[in-house]
Image (cartoon, rainbow, N blue to C red):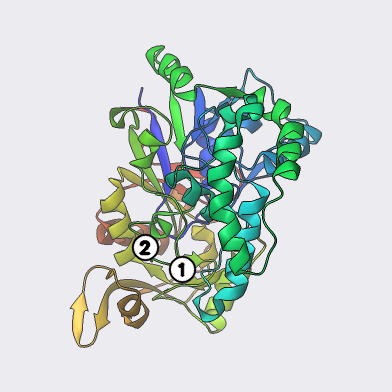
Amino acid sequence: MANVTVIGAQWGDEGKGKIVDWLASRADAVVRFQGGHNAGHTLVVGDVTYKLSLLPSGIVTGTLSLIGNGVVLDPWALKAEIEKLTGQGVAINADNFGIADNCPLILPLHRDLDGLREQAAGAGKIGTTGRGIGPAYEDKVGRRAIRVCDLAHLDALDAQLDRLCAHHDALRAGFGQPPVDREALLAELREIAPFVLQFAQPVWQRLNKVRKAGARILFEGAQGVLLDVDHGTYPFVTSSNTVSGTAASGSGLGPNSTGFVLGIVKAYTTRVGSGPFPTELEDETGQRLGERGHEFGTVTGRKRRCGWFDAVLVRQSCAISGVTGIALTKLDVLDGFEKVKICTGYRLRGKVLDFFPAHAADQAEVEPIYEEMDGWSGTTAGARSWADLPAQAIKYIQRVQELIETPVALVSTSPEREDTILVRDPFVD
């Protein structure tokens, strides 16, 4: 049996939560390998809705759920999320949940800096969630982060705090803010440390044992490829690598362990926050997509921008991430459109492009080239086989996979776990 890596192949918000939940019910372990609590997955299980920001989706089904070293961890957000899920009847303990002991922490000073920068940025705002994710990653690569394992050695933290505060005090002074209150920070860490440390462990080692036992591992990505700090719409991106290759480094397993790469792809396109969006529709059609798709961010509640499916972007994402097959979600949102459009290329200053350029100015200037298809009047909602789909909806799916040069592995037709058309099982070699 294969392992599976799940990533978003657009700007996030593709409906990964439902797919990961569906796969997690058949996996032996689920691992988050990047991002922070800026990621949001909504799971609908029966009559209960679970909203996760940090915990791996497998936790709802009792599957072993691990947070890998590639994640930046806000310990207070973790505690709040665990308490909320526990209140919904989810059992979370050291047997079914673990945190990498080399995972960097998001501290209150990171949230402060995130907010101060965005307020001062003016037209240069990136549109962060303000949760301290970027500053925490900066401290990680700047070699001044406080990590989960440090919570067990708080009395020996002076040297690290010196490095950390030398950096942040200078930045805070520039914003007219007082220096970091080291004693207050240490007091907060001492208070939260016992809660976090009960789950801390060498996650790489536990995963190694799971893998050697022949178990199935699901690697759960956050955000989407177009928000990757290298390959996305820079600078309007997240602060981590969201591509499938990060599953190896962000979990502590080698690249030969990541298995089938499933790219989650919405049947249209959305994004939250600032940045280029070639197929964005600022008209009644865009509003209709947003209303029918309930397009509001799980974490932020922000309204998502909506547009037609962009095959150029998805083809690029699939190539960069080595996607084996896609899961096409929210097809039912397109039900009832007389015509539907797919972007097949761009025009940029008289030239036709079959890729998305790297420079922000070029990204903002490209004009989509559309292919128009007939829509369908029947419903796709709740379909569980090809026979349940209108013929024109099947044609749309077939055209999508042709244009993105990647086969469809499954089609999701509602938020319910069982409303899924399975073409190829990602867990089967």
User: Measured along the vertical axis of the image, is residue 192 above or below residue 328?
Assistant: above
Q: Residue at x 41, y 18 (%)?
A: 208
Where's residue 192, x and y in %? Answer: 73, 33
- Residue type pointed to by label 1: Trp
Q: Which residue is mark 1?
A: 376
Q: Residue furthest top?
A: 213
User: Measured along the vertical axis of the image, is residue 29 above or below residue 119?
Assistant: above
Asked which secondary structure carries label 1, the reply is loop
Where's residue 50, x and y in %? Answer: 69, 43
Asked which secondary structure carries label 2, the reply is helix
Q: Earlier in the sequence, mark 2 or mark 1?
A: 1
- Residue type pointed to by label 2: Tyr
Instruction: Give the position of the C terminus as an image quadrant.
Output: top left
In the image, 234 versus 352, the foreground residue is 234
Which numbered mark, 2 or 1, is in the foreground of this view? Answer: 2
Q: Which residue is mark 2?
A: 396
Which of the numbered marks, if any, corresponds to residue 116?
none
Q: Residue at x 45, y 72 (%)?
A: 275
| Tag 2 near tag 1, CB within 8 Å | yes
In the picture, residue 2 is in which quadrant? top left
Q: How many marks?
A: 2
How crowded pointer 1 is (Cα within 10 Å; few <14, some 14-19, many 20+) is rated as many
User: Measured along the vertical axis of the image, is residue 342 above or below residue 329?
Assistant: below
Q: Is residue 191 left or right of residue 214?
A: right
In the picture, residue 148 is in which quadrant? top right
